[in-house]
Image (spheres, rainbow, N blue to C red):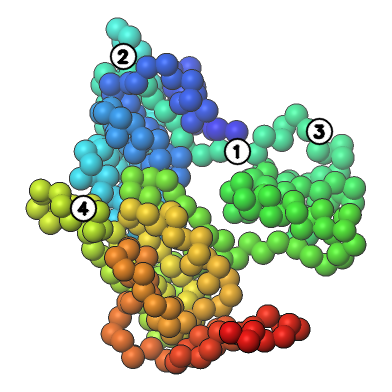
Amino acid sequence: RPMFPDGEGIEENCISSDGFFELEEMPKVAVVVGAGYIAVELAGVLNSLGSEVHLVLRKGHALRSFDETIMNGLDEEMIKAGIHIHRYTNGVAKVIVQNGKKTVTMHSGDTIYGADAVIVAAGRVPNVEELNLEDAKVSLTEKGYIQVDEHQNTTSSSVFALGDVCGSVELTPMAIAAGRRLADRIFGGKEDVKVSYENVPTVVFSHPPIGVIGLTEAEAVAKYDENHVRVYNSSFANLFYGIFDVEASEKPKTRMKLICVGSEEKVVGIHCIGMGVDEMMQGFGVAMKMGCTKADLDSCIAIHPTAAEELVTMGQWGTSTQATGAKVSPLNGAPASDPEGLPKSKM
């Protein structure tokens, strides 16, 4: 459930992300508090509809856990779109109502006057207080999530838990996948099946959208050492904006990053922000889950003109190690494989 921070008038005079869907009028001035998925998504929606939007951040940037290219790229595009970003506020201290308008005061002393709506999207907490889990001998973590192992078992042999309430990869499709594996194990006779929480593709429906999978550059360097990490970057204006009569520097940018490790340049991270990346990430997610290398991506003929082709044309041609992560190599003109156990086509 949504969480409201402590402070004078905050819970009384603000709405949560749930309350956003109950708004009957578009606020002329909207304050969004938070730095995560929901905060940047709602800020983008309201700004696009014409509201004056103020995004209140506790620290310096939104989406701080994302790769630096994504974090900085979103920041630049939000500023360009006209969103007012309040940084290093240490959060909201109080919200009071004066003459029908709301005044928002931050712990830093920064103050926003004349807000019509204040939306708090500063996080969510497990909604478990009414479940009486202690009597069921179900333990919680220090942060209040239900404690589970890799098979979704709780500390009670007859109780299982999955989804956001467990605190791992809090996404609806992740919960569905975990539920399917759990059902297979309990009812389908598949004793050791479990869901993988690694390399989960995810999208933020910000303006512009974001699509990512795998490690950030900083995480890759920390895990594998910078000497074994190679990064490919690209930044360009989507062709959609080609006919727009504005300066090239003012056109929304698409930014893409491939993070590769080892001599075979295995792809361990793909990070994109820009038009259409939300749709293209699903396919590249499959490739990464199958262990693709940079050469595997290079082996795929580009679809032109699209933004997605950038991910299969990065870097200087011919410089990537010709190593594949595929069961059947796609490299160097290798023929496509036939399904196992079937006669080969006569075509």
Name the residue rendered at 85%, 46% in the picture: 159
Which quadrant of the figure contains the N terminus?
top right
| Nearer-N-terminus badge (4/1) | 1
- Give the total of numbered labels: 4
| Nearer-N-terminus badge (1/3) | 1
| Nearer-N-terminus badge (1/2) | 2
Residue type beneath disc 3: Asn
Q: Residues within 10 Å of mark 2 (few under 14, many from 20)?
A: some
Look at mark 3 in the image and give the residue it sits on.
132
Residue 315 percent location from the top left of the image: 30, 81
Q: Residues within 10 Å of mark 4 (few under 14, many from 20)?
A: few
Look at mark 1 in the image and give the residue it sits on.
125
> What mark, if any, has residue 101 been given in the picture?
2
Query: Relative to 145, is 51 on the left or the right?
Result: left
Disc 3 on helix, strand or loop? loop
| Badge 4 vs badge 1, beta-carbon distance below 8 Å | no
Distance CA(mark 4)–CA(mark 2): 38 Å
Residue type beneath disc 4: Tyr
Query: Relative to 1, is 231 on the left or the right?
Result: left
Name the residue rendered at 38%, 50% in the picture: 209
Residue type beneath disc 2: Lys
Distance CA(mark 3)–CA(mark 4): 55 Å
Looking at the image, residue 34 lies above or below residue 118: below
Residue type beneath disc 1: Val
Q: Nearer the viewer, mark 2 or mark 3?
A: 2
Front residue of this view, candidates 178 and 283: 283
Residue 118 percent location from the top left of the image: 38, 25
Look at mark 4 in the image and give the residue it sits on.
241
| Nearer-N-terminus badge (3/4) | 3
Distance CA(mark 2)–CA(mark 3): 41 Å
Q: How crowded is mark 1: few (under 14 residues within 10 Å), some or many (20 or more)?
A: some
